[in-house]
Image (cartoon, rainbow, N blue to C red):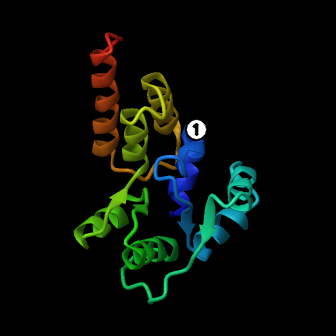
Amino acid sequence: MDSSFWILCHESGVHPHLWVLWQLPVLVPQTVYNQIMVPTHYRDQPDFQQAYRSGFLVVHDPNIPPNNPFGQGEREVLTLAEEMQAVALIDDHQPYLFGIQQGLMAINVPEFIISLMWTGYITVAEAASAFQKLQSSSRVHTNKKVLTWAIGQVRRRQQMQGGPP
């Protein structure tokens, strides 16, 4: 998991569901752990620390040197996903696309929220609320087309349930 993925999950209120969907601990490279823990201005640090102490987040560094043009955290997340044959939880659009082009399974925050909604872990109303929070965030790195698609998925689900479009 990359730091932007955690931050946006926290800002949108879906961070408690990170380990629920897959029933596994989330692997975090040391670089990402440091990015979140060192700056004291992140409001989400206490929740991150609690998830780490509870064993939901596990620090695990990749064994091979990263070989892509992105920041250290993104490079390590993509490399770790490749080594572990795991899902790359990454929200920055260019590294996300790069991972997919390299044959990795990658998921961004809007896709994560939609997955939670379609599997019943959160309600349609909770998904809509999460997207409202994401839209007001200044830290969203997701491509706007992906965000628009995801919001459309929530609206379709609302219509299926007889709610407002």
The quarter holding residue 152 reads top left
What amino acid is labelled 1 in the image? Gly
In this picture, residue 165 sits left or right of residue 5: left
x and y percent of residue 37 in the render? 71, 64
Relative to 79, residue 53 above or below: above
Relative to 116, residue 140 above or below: below
Q: Residue at image x 33%, y 37%?
A: 150
Residue that label 1 marks? 13
Q: Secondary structure at mark 1?
A: loop
Residues 143 and 112: in front is 112
x and y percent of residue 62 in the render? 49, 82
The quarter holding residue 161 reads top left
Q: Residue at image x 37%, y 72%?
A: 85
Q: Residue at image x 28%, y 16%?
A: 159
Number of residue marks: 1
In this picture, residue 32 sits left or right of residue 83: right
x and y percent of residue 145 in the render? 28, 43
x and y percent of residue 55 in the render? 67, 61
Residues 4 and 53: in front is 53
Q: Quadrant of the C terminus?
A: top left
Relative to 15, residue 76 above or below: below
How many C-alpha atoms fall within 10 Å of the one at disc 1: few (<14), some, or many (≥20)?
Answer: some
